[in-house]
Image (cartoon, coloured by chain):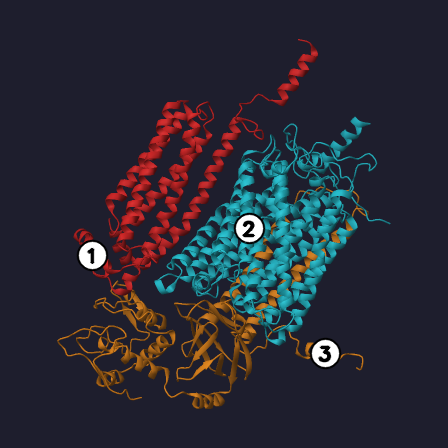
């Protein structure tokens, strides 16, 4: 090869240094890119922990002060649906992890399957949440905006389903009014969690389309991996919420 | 003098004769607060002088013309230690001194005379135990420890008397206290210092310090008739507190005779002191404050009674050393016959009520 | 005889701005609005925060005008309350928090670590859009009647007792918070993962250490403010919440949650400024910063301690005496690292070779004013004196000394220092030195009397005040006028310099630091090849060697 060709090739190589098309130009290597974006997602999850932390702090304080109200308020939640949702989310975390594995091992069909299952579980979770919230609405246990009713706490016998299971004692009027605080926190916490689920579901839909086009199964699966982290985090938050909101008197 | 305009002259005059760098020291604690303040000013001045001297001296000695070539110096552990330990030491002195001062100001002595302060948008209501009520004014005697029990009816306010060097937040939902002992008769400013809405800057007043004799005269001349405790007694009857808290053996509620500052065992097992804050909470949030041995049937009076009303009730209970007055209220109100053992709902008048004698 | 200077500019007759640079690489509005280039984003931020700074400054002018007289005669009390609230909100969240990090930090950090961009350019752009959204929401709040909660949103005033735009203001701050979080996140990832070969942690410029510490605070603290504001907004709209005593909530819970962020926030605001001071003092003394390790660790120490002192804003609010004790002790400890820095900077001057160009003037001003501001913080951190001084103008003076006398001066120092790198042109030295002096004088005249006002007992946030406070207020307003002039001048001459300033060349200040080894303005990708760091930070001997090599090769 003549010198000029070598020089030209050298120059060309410099312009398009040998790197995969998905490596962004400010990164020196694919590894650096993966490393950096992964670290960024962990940091973001750290901010989310601090974000939910404020809610957990408020919950801790109120539960400590108004324990009886929180106990009887929690009896109004359906352990059945709560457990179902927990199972659904844990299953979805499993399918998500399988999805990440599929992307890593370049199995497109597998990836599509697991992403779709995760999406399905996510939607089931939101559906069940909707059912639970609707039930709260019907029973007038939505604080502040829909004629909140303390009847079920002043006179537990008036709510036969719950009474059959727990045989709660009537709360004094002062304590009964604090159940509204319990439900405020219930809706704030599950609502914030549901918002994060909705965002997750939206990104899953986006990912399914991209996965179909083969975006994640040609060696560049960072997006799937990082989203997996996010999804697991949302799952963990739910597990805390389940324990704190539903299982107060069960120990 | 002719060429100085009258306006400017007034300005200068005020400036020269009324200028001060700190408010008058009108309480016992004020000089102590000022002592620490001046120590801090001194330390700050010394610190600032050192920094300024260093910067100015080095800037002159080592400016480029005089010292064209810099000498690279990594650092000096000794210097680092020095300027870490000395500032830390000075700050710790300020911490300890300040903490001692803080504890003094926020720990009222046992013999303090209590005055209630209720802040609301946008005024201060001051209530003396003898029944004297003031708005935006506080009369106090010299030579007597005064404790202020402060609460807000709506938002955060803050009760501040700069001349006494005391200040305390007025919080909705709980009492806060501060104490002082005034030393010099005179009139001093009283401010609200926590932003509380539109007329925050109008929520100011005067503290009028008088000699004990003058104060006594003032008390006598400005009483509205009933002491706070007497107002409280009225409320006690009209709100039917005496239906349960009647000191009878089969009473549904614990006897309140002598309960103030006593140790109470609650239904939860914990022991508390029945102070002002406890009594207030027990009236407004009884669910949390059930005495051991009694059932949680007391309704909450939240919304039925103002902070002034609560204060009156607390004063009444504080002064309940025997059950004589209590029995008097039972005589002057009639309860439903025994076989209808139900406390009337809050706010509802009991069956019959005769005139309550003052 | 002209003052000695280290400025070294290329020959004006032949000097040219490099044709290919980040400003000329692409043209058109979209190339700016969809950019990933950290330098363009920094420029967008610079324009935006300057805009909001002047709105906040105009509001300050209104405050000082009203306070000329004891009565509420310029505007109604309600209006005054809105003016100071908006002043605080805009200055804190739309100016001070993003000031150095989002402008200078964005511009310089990748170059300082030897990278071609920040780790997450799209997130960087998102940060700016969130900032613009927050700014828009804040302007909307102002236009539709303003908010009068104070920047502190104290409950229950903000949740139940006001009819103003609390919700839109709260949401605006919420959005601005996420802008800040993403900036901090980007910095931390970049500093961890994108350092060039040879760039160990202890070879990083101290500007990086300071911004790293501030970024940790942004990431961990800001989300707590976000959720607190969500709770306030919910309580306002749904009428039940955890802050209302009537329902069993606790207004003090809001205070704890709010100050858990807002105390670290003040260190978010000052730490990047301290980073600028390190760079400037080093460059204009031609010396490595004295005690590099101590200064680096003190930044981290401030960040750690920052999270444990929040209740010093609550000493008189009914926290227990013992809690007050603990927080006061920790506050004393957090003051020490700042003192360490001041002394280290002072000793950097020792046996240096000092010149007094504008960035250095601002830096020296910073040192004096920050010392006063910091020391008066100790007055407030000691519980006993805090009782007398809190909630008065003493606090107002304290935080303006550290924020305006400290942070704003550091910001201006940094802007002048990196201006030649950013634009390729020098600003005019004489008028900028004059502006620095005017600012310094105006600042002292404005805010020093406020210490005395506070000691005398004048409360904060008062639209009207008793007449005995007037004289000092008049001084303060007079100073504010001078200060205003001092801040207007840079706008004028910096804009002028864009067209008429002298061409700066790569390294007009003869500074060390990788950003000065590139062209001015830099290429979009900063470096043609990633550099290899083979020397310590602030290595002026290395710099001399470089310059000798250059002369030799050209000659």
Q: Nearer the viewer, mark 2 or mark 1?
A: 2
Q: Are marks 3 and 2 in contact (CB under 8 Å)?
A: no
Which residue is under mark 2? C136
Comparing B222 with B208, the one in front is: B222
Alpha-carbon neighbours of circle 3 within 10 Å: few (<14), some, or many (≥20)? few
Q: For chain A, give the colour.
A: red
Q: Image point 56% across, 43% down: which residue?
A: C128
Comparing B89 with A37, the one in front is: A37
Q: For chain B, give the colour.
A: orange
Q: Image point 53% across, 23% down: which residue?
A: A20
State the SS at label 2: helix
| Number of numbered discs visible in the structure rendering | 3
Q: Nearer the viewer, mark 3 or mark 2?
A: 2
Which residue is under mark 1? A168
- Regarding residue A119, the answer to whether it shows in the image is yes
- State whether residue B241 is above or below residue A244: below
Circles 3 and 2 on the same chain: no
Residue C381's x, y, as percent?
A: 54, 61
Residue B196's x, y, as percent?
A: 49, 67
Which residue is under mark 3? B7
Residue A68's x, y, as percent?
A: 26, 58
Q: Where is residue C22, by image quadrant? A: top right
> Which chain: cyan?
C
- State whether residue C351 is above or below residue A1: below
- State whether residue B222 is above or below residue A78: below
State the SS at label 1: loop
- State whether residue C514 is above or below residue B176: above
Separation of disc 2 and disc 1 at Cα? Answer: 51 Å
Separation of disc 3 and disc 2 at Cα? Answer: 46 Å
Separation of disc 1 and disc 3 at Cα? Answer: 78 Å
């Amino acid at each position: 090869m003549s010198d000029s060709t070598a020089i030209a090739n050298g120059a060309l190589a410099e312009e398009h240094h040998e790197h995969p098309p998905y490596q962004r130009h400010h990164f020196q290597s694919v590894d650096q890119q993966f490393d950096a974006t992964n670290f960024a997602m962990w940091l973001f999850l750290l901010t989310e922990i601090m974000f939910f932390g404020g809610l957990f702090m408020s919950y801790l304080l109120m539960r400590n002060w108004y324990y009886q109200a929180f106990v009887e308020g929690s009896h109004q939640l359906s352990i059945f649906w709560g457990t179902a949702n927990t199972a659904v989310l844990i299953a979805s975390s499993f399918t998500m992890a399988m999805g990440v594995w599929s992307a890593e091992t370049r199995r497109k069909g597998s990836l599509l399957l697991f992403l779709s299952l995760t999406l399905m579980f996510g939607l089931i979770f939101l559906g069940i949440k909707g059912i639970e919230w609707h039930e709260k609405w019907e029973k007038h246990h939505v604080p502040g905006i829909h004629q909140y009713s303390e009847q079920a706490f002043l006179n537990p016998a008036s709510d036969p389903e719950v009474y059959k299971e727990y045989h709660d004692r009537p709360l004094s009027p002062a304590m009964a009014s604090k159940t509204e605080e319990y439900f405020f926190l219930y809706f704030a916490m599950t609502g914030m969690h549901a918002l994060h689920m909705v965002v997750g579901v939206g990104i899953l839909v986006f990912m399914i389309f991209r996965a179909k086009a083969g975006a994640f199964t040609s060696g560049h699966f960072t997006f799937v991996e990082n989203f997996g982290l996010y999804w697991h985090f949302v799952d963990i938050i739910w597990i805390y919420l389940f324990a704190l909101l539903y299982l107060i008197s069960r120990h | 003098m002719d060429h100085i305009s009258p306006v400017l002259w007034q300005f200068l005059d005020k400036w020269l004769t009324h200028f001060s760098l700190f408010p008058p020291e009108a309480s016992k604690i004020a000089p102590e607060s000022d002592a620490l303040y001046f120590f801090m000013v001194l330390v700050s001045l010394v610190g600032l002088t050192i920094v300024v001297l260093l910067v100015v001296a080095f800037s002159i000695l080592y400016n480029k013309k005089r010292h064209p070539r810099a000498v690279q110096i990594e650092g000096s552990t000794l210097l680092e230690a020095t300027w870490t330990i000395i500032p830390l030491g000075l700050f710790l002195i300020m911490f300890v001194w300040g903490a001692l001062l803080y504890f003094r100001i926020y720990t009222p002595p046992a013999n303090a005379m209590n005055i209630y302060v209720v802040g609301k948008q946008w005024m201060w209501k001051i209530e003396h135990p003898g029944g004297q009520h003031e708005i935006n004014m506080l009369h106090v005697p010299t030579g007597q420890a005064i404790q202020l029990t402060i609460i807000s009816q709506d938002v955060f306010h803050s009760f501040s008397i700069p001349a006494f060097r005391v200040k305390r937040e007025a919080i909705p939902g709980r009492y806060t206290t501060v104490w002082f002992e005034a030393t010099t008769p005179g009139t001093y400013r009283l401010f609200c210092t926590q932003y509380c809405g539109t007329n925050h800057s109008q929520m100011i007043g005067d503290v009028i310090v008088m000699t004990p004799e003058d104060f006594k005269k003032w008390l006598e001349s400005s009483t509205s008739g009933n002491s706070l405790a007497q107002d409280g007694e009225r409320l006690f009857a009209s709100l039917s507190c005496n239906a349960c808290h009647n000191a009878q053996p089969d009473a549904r509620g614990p006897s309140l005779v002598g309960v103030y500052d006593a140790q109470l065992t609650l239904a939860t097992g914990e022991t508390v002191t029945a102070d002002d804050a406890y009594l207030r909470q027990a009236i407004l949030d009884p669910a949390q404050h059930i005495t051991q041995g009694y059932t949680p049937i007391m309704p909450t009076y939240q919304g039925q009674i103002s902070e002034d009303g609560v204060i009156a009730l607390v004063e009444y209970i504080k002064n309940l050393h025997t059950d004589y007055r209590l029995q008097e209220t039972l005589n002057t109100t009639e309860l439903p016959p025994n076989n209808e053992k139900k406390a009337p709902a809050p706010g509802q008048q009991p069956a019959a009520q005769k005139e309550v004698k003052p | 005889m002209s003052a000695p200077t280290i400025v070294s500019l290329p020959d004006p007759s032949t000097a040219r701005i490099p044709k290919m640079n980040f400003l000329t690489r692409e043209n058109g509005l979209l190339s700016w609005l969809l950019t990933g280039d950290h330098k363009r984003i920094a420029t967008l931020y610079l324009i935006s925060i300057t805009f909001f700074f002047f709105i906040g400054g105009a509001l300050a002018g209104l405050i000082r005008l009203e306070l000329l007289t004891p009565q509420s005669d310029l505007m109604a009390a309600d209006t005054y309350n809105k003016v100071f609230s908006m002043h605080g909100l805009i200055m804190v969240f739309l100016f001070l928090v993003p000031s150095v990090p989002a402008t200078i930090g964005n511009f310089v950090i990748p170059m300082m670590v030897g990278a071609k961009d920040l780790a997450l350019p799209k997130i960087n752009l998102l940060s700016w859009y969130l900032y613009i959204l927050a700014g828009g929401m804040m302007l909307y709040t102002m236009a539709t009647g303003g908010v009068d909660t104070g920047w502190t949103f104290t409950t229950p005033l903000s949740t139940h007792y006001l009819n103003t735009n609390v919700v839109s203001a709260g949401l605006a701050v919420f959005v601005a918070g996420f802008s800040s979080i993403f900036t901090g996140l980007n910095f931390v990832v970049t500093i961890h993962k994108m350092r060039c070969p040879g760039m160990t942690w202890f070879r990083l410029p101290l500007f990086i250490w300071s911004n790293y510490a501030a970024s940790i605070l942004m990431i961990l603290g800001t989300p707590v403010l976000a959720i607190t504001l969500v709770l306030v907004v919910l309580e306002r709209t749904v009428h039940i919440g955890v802050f209302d005593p009537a329902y069993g909530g606790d207004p003090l819970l809001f205070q704890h949650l709010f100050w858990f962020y807002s105390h670290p926030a003040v260190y978010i605001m000052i730490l990047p400024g301290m980073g600028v001071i390190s760079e400037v003092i080093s460059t204009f003394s031609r010396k490595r910063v004295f005690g590099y390790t101590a200064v680096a660790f003190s930044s981290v120490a401030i960040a750690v301690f920052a999270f444990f002192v929040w209740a010093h804003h609550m000493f008189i609010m009914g926290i227990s005496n013992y809690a007050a004790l603990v927080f006061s002790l920790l506050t004393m400890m957090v003051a020490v690292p700042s003192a360490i820095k001041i002394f280290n900077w002072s000793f950097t001057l020792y046996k240096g070779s000092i010149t007094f160009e504008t960035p250095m003037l601002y830096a020296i001003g910073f040192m004096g004013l920050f010392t006063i501001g910091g020391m008066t913080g100790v007055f407030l951190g000691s519980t006993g004196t805090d009782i007398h001084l809190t909630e008065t103008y003493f606090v107002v003076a304290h935080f303006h000394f550290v924020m305006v006398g400290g942070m704003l001066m550091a910001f201006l120092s940094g802007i002048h220092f990196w201006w030649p790198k950013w634009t390729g042109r020098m600003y005019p030295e004489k008028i900028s030195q004059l502006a620095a002096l005017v600012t310094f004088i105006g600042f002292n005249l404005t805010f020093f009397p406020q210490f005395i006002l506070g000691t005398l007992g004048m409360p904060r946030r008062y639209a009207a005040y008793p007449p005995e406070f007037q004289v000092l207020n008049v001084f303060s307003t007079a100073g504010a006028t001078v200060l205003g002039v001092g801040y207007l001048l840079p706008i004028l001459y910096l804009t002028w310099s864009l067209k008429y300033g002298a061409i700066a060349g790569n390294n007009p200040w003869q500074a060390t630091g990788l950003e000065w080894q590139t062209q001015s303005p830099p290429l979009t990708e900063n470096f043609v090849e990633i550099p290899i760091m083979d020397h310590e930070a602030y290595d002026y001997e290395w710099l001399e060697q470089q310059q000798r090599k250059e002369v030799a090769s050209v000659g």
